[in-house]
């Protein structure tokens, strides 16, 4: 296109765009809509390395053009993907209304990554939306998704945020931004629902084959691929939600369009981490029934998986009744698998090796105590790991001391030692999470042109299991608790 285009081509792109070759119903060809005066705010150098992309020889001006979508590298092929979704239980045909998939890039080890611009302008799926995004929510997705990566939780990642130099109208005018998001793919439960709704089984089969090829090649040779895909999805989603429960994460809007087939956390909107333990915690201002509350997340994942199963019934068995029976049987294993993984995860949080018949009671009693005494979820486990904080008076409580004695007795089982259990606990319990008030402070500063606080919080969240200099200011719970904190979809 221009000389600048040659400049951005120096990054080392290795495009292999497979999704854009799928049938017409899956997508529309759509370029990002150019923005007025893009300005690069943040670029993720570590992630660039993981992708085998090198941006160091590209001028700041051209990086701004690149990560706003104003200039596209050679070999990219930008599309908007079609999908549907149950939003708070109601089915809607959706699609990328403010995002485009710029291309699929292969790292040197041939790992495949979607590169998506979010906030890149209107598409045929935009409905009444403006196709744009504001700086705050895009930077928020950047911080939280990178924090999730640091916490070893499967997630999409964030490569860059660019300010567009244009305002977007929300409750008020806000600075516009584009986020460059990296995902192992952007295929959602809702992608299957979209094609199922068009009643074209041929297309659905194409999607299923594509997903198996791209994400789960191990089931290519299985006798019943569709059933095995369902079972795989159950497992990867349970792994994901157990990780959310481990760290106190609340996704906030687990509509079927926001659930990735790959098992990565995706679409960071009104999500947040809980401070004091309360299983009913909800941050999202629109989730008035608590559908997506902290402790409801496993149930909702199961509900979403049932919507997925409905789409692939035709491929499980030719006899529909038989297929439904087989799918139901698979879905009914959810609770038991979840319960086992949850219990083992909580054992890890407490440094417990092996199994004891009273483990579940021991765990539930701690959670009940935390709930009753408004104890901080993250910091309670830090306290049990002998981390010393200023807020530790809370644990001079008689009930807690009695519980702790039971825990100490349990720790003695199965040849456990202090070294062993502390090591296990330190790999399971983060010392630091993205505290809501710290994230808000970083976003407010960025809105005023100061990106330094965002860098500081990102830095400490890179290694959340490791003690670091200055970590303590990031460890305090919000002075206002969970209750005053509200999140918004941020569209
Ligand atoms: P989300 O809440 O971000 O998961 O989005 C739900 C649906 O609304 C998706 O299809 C989005 O593409 C679409 N959407 C969200 N915000 C906008 C916007 N500002 N303009 C157009 N479409 C949007
Ligand atoms: Mg979404």
Image (cartoon, rainbow, N blue to C red):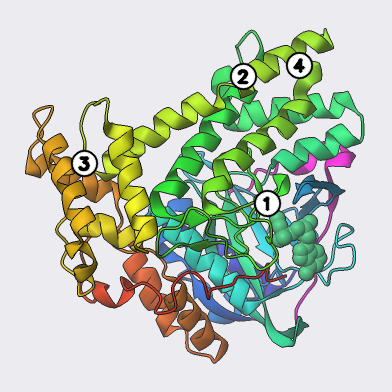
| Residue plotted at (31% across, 56% down) | 430
Measured Cα–Cα span from mark 2 to mark 1: 35 Å
Tag on residue 103? 1
Is 423 situated above or below 372?
above
Q: Is residue 62 above or below residue 296?
A: below
Where 62 falls versus 73 (above or below)?
A: below
For the residue carrying disc 2, how many other residues have a C-alpha within 10 Å: few (<14), some (14-19), or many (20+)? some
Q: Residue at x 80, y 60 (%)?
A: 97
Query: Counting other residues with Cα less than 10 Å from the Cα at mark 4, is it few (<14), some (14-19), or many (20 or more)?
Result: some
Report x, y in % for residue 277: 41, 58
Q: Quick one: quadrant of the C terminus? A: bottom right
User: Magenta stretch?
Assistant: 13-38
Q: Residue at x 52, y 80 (%)?
A: 443
Q: Locate residue 223 relative to residue 108 in the image: left or right.
A: right
Q: Secondary structure at mark 4?
A: helix
First reached walking from the N terminus: tag 4 or tag 1: 1
Residue position for label 4: 324
Q: Residue furthest front?
A: 398
- Marks 4 and 2: in contact by CB < 8 Å? no
Task: State the SS at label 1.
Answer: strand
Residue holding disc 3: 351
Q: Give the distance between the C-alpha atoms of the residues marked 3 and 4, in whole angstroms.
A: 41 Å
Nearer-the-camera pick, 12 or 408: 408
Specify which label sits upstream in the sequence, 3 or 4: 4
**As rendered, which of 458 and 163 lies closer to the eye?**
458
């Amino acid at each position: 296109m221009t000389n600048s285009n040659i400049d951005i081509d120096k990054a080392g792109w290795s495009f292999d765009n497979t999704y854009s070759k799928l049938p017409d119903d899956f997508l529309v060809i759509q370029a990002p809509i150019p923005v007025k005066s893009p300005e690069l705010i943040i670029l993720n150098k570590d992630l660039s390395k993981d992708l085998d992309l090198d941006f160091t020889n590209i001028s700041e001006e051209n990086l701004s053009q690149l990560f706003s979508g104003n200039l596209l590298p050679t070999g990219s092929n930008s599309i908007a993907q079609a999908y549907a979704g149950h939003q708070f239980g109601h089915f809607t045909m959706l699609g990328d209304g403010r995002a485009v998939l710029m291309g699929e890039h292969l790292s040197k080890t041939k790992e495949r990554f979607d590169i998506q611009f979010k906030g890149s302008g209107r598409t045929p799926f935009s409905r009444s939306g403006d196709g744009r995004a504001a700086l705050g929510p895009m930077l928020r997705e950047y911080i939280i998704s990178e924090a999730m990566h640091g916490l070893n939780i499967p997630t999409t990642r964030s490569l860059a945020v660019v300010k567009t130099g244009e305002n977007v109208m929300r409750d008020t005018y806000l600075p516009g931004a584009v986020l460059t998001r990296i995902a192992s793919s952007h295929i959602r439960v809702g992608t299957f629902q979209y094609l199922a709704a068009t009643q074209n089984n041929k297309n659905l089969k194409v999607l299923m084959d594509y997903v198996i090829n791209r994400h789960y090649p191990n089931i290519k040779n299985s006798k019943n691929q569709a059933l095995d895909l369902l079972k795989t999805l159950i497992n990867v989603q349970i792994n994901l939600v157990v990780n959310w429960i481990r760290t106190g994460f609340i996704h906030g809007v687990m509509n079927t369009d926001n659930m990735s087939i790959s098992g990565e956390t995706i679409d960071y909107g009104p999500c947040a981490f809980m401070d004091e333990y309360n299983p009913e915690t909800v941050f999202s201002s629109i989730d008035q029934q608590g559908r997506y509350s902290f402790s409801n997340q496993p149930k909702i994942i199961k509900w979403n998986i049932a919507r997925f199963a409905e789409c692939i019934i035709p491929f499980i068995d030719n006899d529909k009744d038989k297929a439904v029976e087989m799918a139901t049987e698979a879905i009914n294993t959810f609770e038991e698998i979840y319960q086992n993984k949850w219990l083992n995860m909580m054992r890890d949080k407490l440094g417990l090796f092996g199994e004891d018949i009273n483990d579940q009671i021991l765990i539930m009693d701690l959670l009940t105590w935390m709930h009753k005494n408004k104890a901080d979820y993250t910091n309670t486990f830090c306290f049990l790991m002998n981390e010393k904080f200023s807020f530790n008076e809370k644990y001079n409580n008689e009930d807690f001391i009695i519980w702790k004695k039971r825990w100490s007795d349990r720790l003695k089982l199965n040849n456990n030692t202090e070294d062993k259990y502390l090591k296990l606990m330190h790999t399971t319990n983060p010392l630091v999470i993205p505290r809501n008030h710290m994230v808000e402070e970083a976003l407010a500063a960025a809105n005023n042109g100061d990106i330094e606080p965002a860098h500081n919080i990102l830095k400490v969240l890179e290694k959340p299991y490791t003690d670091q200099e200055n970590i303590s200011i990031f460890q305090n719970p919000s002075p206002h608790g969970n209750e005053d904190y509200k999140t918004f979809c941020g569209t």
